[in-house]
Structure formats: structure tokens, C-alpha cells
């Protein structure tokens, strides 16, 4: 097994053959489709590759960007889901088949380098995500996929806005906000912000984002999702008060890896905006 701690992954990424190695793995994913759970087993090689990618990009922003730059979701999404989508819905929401690719998409979509421009592939993903937003085990990851793609894939956001399921996604995301699961709240809040003007609710959303940014959750993308919300809303609610800025200023000193990276970048942006 591979121990994917921050330093190990960072050293791995410095290898001159690392990008080529990852491209080979992505080519394997592009060639082998995940079947309908009723039709056959999850291909072991696909599962192993996705687990490997999910481990190495989860806590390392440098590796995340390297992988995102060479990942073509236009090709991968049909390979991941087309066998399991029929009549605009998922045929079988089997977590062992769905979770590895959804986690991978959520992680790589959190990078500004992700590529998703295909309308057919976007349509497949929208159908999948609509179904998963009501799945207790996968709702946070589905919402995180949307949050990332709304910000990093202008094509996907444009496709969604005119999609027949657009209103359904808005409704389901809004329904997740009162959840007792902090991971679900953070992900759905971050996905909701780009879709609504919010009005007076912007201040409440900002307070929630700061709260979860300070407290953190077990969700790997939590800090990044909260930082997105804070950046998005700062212009709507005005400058933060000094107490909140002081709270956020202290956070990087007790953080490491991608959390520290995101918090430091947020502070830099807040200074520029102040």
C-alpha cells in the first residue's frame, strides 16, 4: 500500500516521470468503463487507480493542479457513468461503484485547471449529481462537485443554467442547508452561492462559512469550500469586522497541508480586498 502523507506525495511529484506516469493511469481510466452494477463487477484496476489519485491529491494542492491539468473529464465522465444512466436517472446507486469516481471528480474540480466542456458529458454528470444529492452517503461529495465546477468550469455552469434539471438541483441544494451533517452543509452552501443573489441572507451565509472555516470538519474539501464562500460574499456583505479577520489570521498557524495553503491564500485575498 502507498502511504500518502504530504511530504511523501510532494517528493513523488518532483520525480521527472511523475506526470507521464499519471497520464498513463488516466489513459487506462479512459479505456475501461465502469459497468452497471447489475452487469458486472467494478474493474479492479479502475478502482485502484481512482483510490491512488484520490489519496495523492486530497492533501496536496501542487499535486492536485498537476493531475487536474492532464485530466479530461469530457472523456472520463462517460466512462465512469454512462453504463449506469438510463432515462435521465441512475439505474443503481451502488456506493462502491459511484463513490471513487465522484470523489475524484470533486477533488480535481476544485482546481482551476480542470477541463470539462462537453455538453453530453456534462449532461451525464448532472443526471448523476441530481440523484446523489439525496443520498446520505454521497450528498456532500455531489455538492462539492457542483461547487468546484461552478467556479472552475464556465462551460459546465452555462450548460447547467439552461438544463431541464437546473431548478431541481437548486431545490435539492437548498434542502441540504439545514442538514445536521456539517460536511453536507459546507458543500451545499458552497454550491448554492454561485446560483443565488441571496440578498439579506448573504450575511448569514458568510457567518456560516467563517464558522465552519474556524471549526473545520472531517470533509477533505471543507476549508477550500468555505474559503470560496467567503471570497464570493465579501463583496456582497462588505468588509469583515476585525474580530473575524483576527480569527482567520490565527488559523494557518495550527494548520498543515492543503488547509494551511487555502487559509494563507484566503488571508492574502482578504488583505487585497480590505
Image (spheres, rainbow, N blue to C red):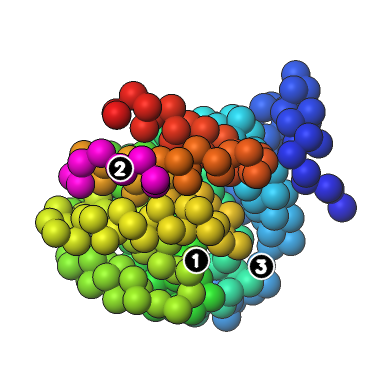
Label 1 sits on residue: 183
The numbered dot on residue 42 is: 3
Instruction: Using the image as rendered, state which of residue 40 and residue 255 is in the foreground.
Output: 255
Q: Is residue 81 left or right of residue 272?
A: right
Residue 92: x and y in percent read 49, 79
257 vs 120: above or below: above
Determine whether, in the image, residue 215 is placed left or right of residue 268.
Answer: right
- Give me the residue at 84% from left, 48% from top: 2
Q: Position of residue 87 (x, y in %)?
A: 31, 75
Between 238 and 89, the one lying in front of the other is 238
Residue at image location 23% in from the left, 72% down from the top: 171
Label 3 close to label 2 by CB (< 8 Å): no
Residue 2 visible (yes or no): yes
- Mark 2 Cα-neighbour bin, 10 Å: few <14, some 14–19, many ≥20: some
Q: Secondary structure at mark 1?
A: helix
Q: Residues within 10 Å of mark 1 (few under 14, many from 20)?
A: many
Q: Quadrant of residue 90?
A: bottom left
The crowding category of the residue bearing disc 3, from other C-alpha atoms within 10 Å (few below 14, some 14 to 19, many at least 20), is some
Q: Earlier in the sequence, mark 1 or mark 2?
A: 1
Question: Which residue is nearer to you in this view: 209 or 248?
Answer: 248
Q: Which residue is mark 2?
A: 240
1 vs 2, front mark: 2
Q: Residue furthest front?
A: 243
Q: Nearer the viewer, mark 3 or mark 2?
A: 2
Alpha-carbon span between mark 1 and mark 2 = 24 Å
Q: Earlier in the sequence, mark 3 or mark 1?
A: 3
Question: How far apart are the alpha carbons under marks 3 and 2?
Answer: 48 Å
User: Which stretch did the figure color magenta?
Assistant: 236-244
State the residue lying farthest toward the top. Answer: 16
- Residue 39 forms part of the magenta stretch: no
* Residue 71 visible, this orientation: no
Q: What is the spatial separation of the Cα atoms under label 3 and label 1, in whole angstroms? A: 27 Å
Amino acid at each position: 500500500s502507498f502511504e500518502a502523507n504530504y511530504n511523501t506525495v510532494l517528493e513523488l511529484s518532483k520525480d521527472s516521470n511523475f506526470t507521464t506516469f499519471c497520464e498513463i493511469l488516466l489513459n487506462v481510466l479512459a479505456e475501461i468503463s465502469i459497468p452497471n452494477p447489475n452487469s458486472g463487477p467494478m474493474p479492479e484496476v479502475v478502482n485502484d487507480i481512482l483510490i491512488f489519485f484520490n489519496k495523492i491529491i486530497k492533501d496536496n494542492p501542487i499535486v492536485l493542479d498537476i493531475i487536474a491539468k492532464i485530466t479530461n473529464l469530457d472523456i472520463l465522465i462517460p466512462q465512469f457513468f454512462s453504463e449506469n444512466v438510463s432515462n435521465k436517472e441512475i439505474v443503481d446507486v451502488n456506493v462502491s461503484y459511484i463513490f471513487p469516481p465522484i470523489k475524484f471528480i470533486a477533488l480535481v474540480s476544485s482546481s482551476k485547471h480542470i477541463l470539462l466542456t462537453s455538453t453530453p458529458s456534462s449532461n451525464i454528470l448532472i443526471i448523476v449529481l441530481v440523484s446523489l444529492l439525496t443520498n446520505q452517503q454521497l450528498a456532500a461529495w455531489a455538492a462539492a462537485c457542483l461547487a468546484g465546477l461552478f467556479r472552475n468550469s464556465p462551460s459546465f455552469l452555462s450548460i447547467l443554467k439552461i438544463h431541464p434539471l437546473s431548478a431541481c438541483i437548486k431545490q435539492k441544494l437548498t434542502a441540504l442547508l439545514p442538514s445536521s451533517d456539517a460536511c453536507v452543509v459546507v458543500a451545499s452552501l458552497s454550491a448554492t452561492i454561485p446560483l443565488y443573489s441571496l440578498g439579506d441572507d448573504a450575511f448569514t451565509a458568510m457567518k456560516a462559512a467563517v464558522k465552519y472555516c474556524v471549526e473545520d470538519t472531517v470533509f477533505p474539501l471543507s476549508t477550500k469550500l468555505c474559503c470560496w464562500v467567503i471570497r464570493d460574499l465579501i463583496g456582497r456583505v462588505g468588509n469583515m469586522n476585525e474580530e473575524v479577520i483576527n480569527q482567520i489570521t490565527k488559523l494557518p498557524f495550527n494548520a498543515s497541508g492543503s488547509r494551511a495553503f487555502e487559509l494563507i491564500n484566503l488571508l492574502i485575498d482578504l488583505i487585497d480586498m480590505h
